[in-house]
Amino acid sequence: GEPGVGKSRLVAEILRLGAAQGFALFGGECESYGANSSYLAWQPIWRGLFGIDGAWSAPQQLTVLGDGLREIHATFPARAPLLGPLLNLAIPENEFTSSLSPRLRKTLLEELLVDCLRAFARHQPLLIVLEACQWLDPLSYDLWEAMTPAILDLPVLLVFASRLQTHETRLRAEQASKLSHYTELQLAPLTTAEAADFIVLKATQLLGSAASLSPQLVHLVTAQAEGNPFYVEELLTYLHYRGVNFQDEAALARVELPDSLQRLTLSLLDQFSESQKITVKVASVIGRLFQAAWLAGIYPELGAAVRIRADLVWLQQHELLLQEAADPELTYRFRQVIMQSVAYESLPHALKQVLHEQIGDFIERTYPDAIEQYLDLLAYHYDRSTNGEKQRSYLRRAGEAAQAEYANTVALDYFTRLLAILPPADQGAVQLKLGQIHDTVGRYAEAETAFQAALALATQGNERSLIAQCQIALGELRRKQSQYENAAAYFTAAQIIAEQIGDEAAVAKAQVCAGSLALYRGDYAAAHVHYTQGLAIRRRLPDQSQVANTLSDLAIATAQQGDLVQSGQLFAESLAIRRTLGDLWGVANSLNNLGELALMQERYVDAYPFLEEAVTIYRAIGDRWSLGNAVLTLGNVLRTQGDYQAAFPLYQESLQIYRSLGDRRSLAYLLENIGGLLSLQGETTRPMRLAGAAAAMRDRLQIPLSPAEQNQLDQALTPARQALAEAAAAAWESGRALTLEEAMAEALGSAA
């Protein structure tokens, strides 16, 4: 709904009803300055769910968080660092999280929160409210989308209040409307009769008792407010403070009302004392929610704390402000967003710039040890100041932090704004970052433009190291676009320049990228050469994680050449380095590779411990996709050994994982594997139906089995096909008609 139409009032009523029905209540509100602040509105909600008080010391908060996670699952405390951005806590990394990519961190965080939500909802129904969602940041939207399907079978009600005024909010609402458990309420203006009733109620409140009102008052206010409840309320307040008699038709006929809600709000502000007006305007620059102690620290001209406190009390009594909290910090909020907005816009532009800089300076002085937790806020305020040095510094730092959180839309915004205020000589590296982010999210045309701009700037400035980085980035982009010769040319050019300037890291990267290109094209000999040369260089450099990664790449190329023994040795060396580094995700990856290699070599006894340890680590980390893959491979080992009873529950677990992730390609493989296993166990109809369901899914997704995979499936289904004889085809066709949920139900049934 539009501003003032009654969203906050509706939310308050929802909360009242929820409390009466036994729901635990949790809420958060977006801020106009927080559209780039990751999880800002979710912070109070999840702090409340975990029972964390922001007034506590950091160690106490971490202790309570760890205890809460441990109550849910013994392995969850190890994942606590993932919660740092969400809770705005500095949580030290550990061996489980230190090597995770930004994309994987985000995925694991969302999965962890869904698991925690399920645990909390077992104790009490939950009512979670987010307000002013027109300013919701991208990661908060993603978390919303991760949670909404998960609550279908939970006693959880999610309420989102928004103006629905932006393309993003409209698009998200359209997506949510497809859910069976989604209901949308659009608030309309009051009807004339409703507005008249509301006028009577408000007038009674202002006058202290019920009184007959002039019809002229009702007509005047109703016509001007056009059904907006807040406008109605403020018009009556305006008339009351001007001493207009609500029963005097002649006086009402002479009144000239402000012709807009904005002008009305300004008129109300003009009735305040000078100190009250200045207090309101300084507070408006901080945001809708502000701490009283910040006012004097930001703008000492406001006077003593006692005077500021008196002004705030007066503003609260006159319903401009609401007291949000008394302890540990006296905190207020503007009763309506429009009040804050109008107060802010009434300030001269130059004074706004001064105040924004003073807010940034205050935060730096007051929270010197927590700057990372205030990066978005500092970037917001300094970007609206005249302090160019701080503006550039915080836009860059906030952009890099957003990139590390996989908040790609936010990072693009920060770096784009940074680019606009940099001299051309300093723009190349930022253009490269923009290109990398566009590349990450699959916007290849935008990535091309940014990479080419970075390359041109680097060439103009003779920044040869940057030239090499741009050429490598363009080579990787060309590979993804299947322009292989062009990609190879870029890698070669980058290697030549890097060798000329002695940049060994860039030489190694160019070689490894060229190796991956050759591997992708099936030229395993060339891939082996490039990886070997890149590995030799990286062994001389301090970054051992890159050595481990290149060893793994080389092992894959070696296996493709048929030398499985040498491949195993390379995988083992990569594993040893990752164990030394404490890179648990990398360790699990190496173990999974060794397990799959042993399976290829039919060394089933060796494969099992590799895969079993990989599964244990993936469970602890919470990487569900990798867990699903490792469990599937472990099931394949047991099936090949003839241990069908042990393989079946592993296949089912993998099936449930990929079902929850919506990975239909993997689900097709699981239906086929389960069907094949059931056939080997002597079942007949169900194996054929599952194979038929998988075939129909593959047709829809256009992902046919390879000849080798089809042959393997046919062999597994032979017992069922022979037992059914002519009825096999009918069973297969009936399976093609199954819905995904019906096929899942058959696959998850008991084995024979």
Image: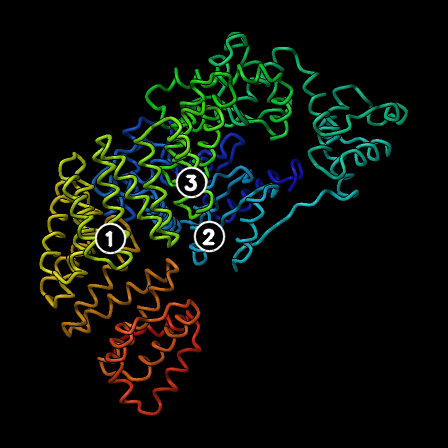
694 shown above or below 491: below
Residue 536: image quadrant is top left
Residue 570, image x and y in percent? 12, 51
Distance between the alpha carbons at the discs numbered 2 and 3: 22 Å
> Can residue 356 be spotted in the picture?
yes
Residue bearing the label numbered 1 = 619
Residue marked by disc 3 = 408
Tag 3: Cα neighbours inside 10 Å, few (<14), some, or many (≥20)? many
Is the Cβ of the residue at disc 3 closer than 8 Å to that at disc 1? no
Amino acid at pointer 2: Thr
Residue linked to disc 2: 148
Give the image quarter of residue 11.
top right
Q: Residues within 10 Å of mark 1 (few under 14, many from 20)?
A: some
Instruction: Establish if 235 lies above or below 26.
Output: above
Q: CA distance from mark 1 to mark 2?
A: 24 Å
Helix, strand or loop for disc 1: helix
**Location of the C terminus (image quadrant):** bottom left
State the image coordinates of residue 693 (x, y, percent, origin top left): 38, 75
Instruction: Identify the residue at image location x=69%, y=33%.
Output: 230
Residue at 38% from the left image edge and 64% from the top image edge: 664
As measured in the structure, the alpha-carbon distance from the residue carrying label 3 to the one carrying label 1 is: 27 Å
- Crowd band around label 2 with a 10 angstrom C-alpha radius: few (<14), some (14–19), many (20+): some
Query: Which x, y percent locates residue 484?
Result: 34, 53
Q: Tag 2's secondary structure?
A: helix
Sequence-earlier tag: 1 or 2: 2
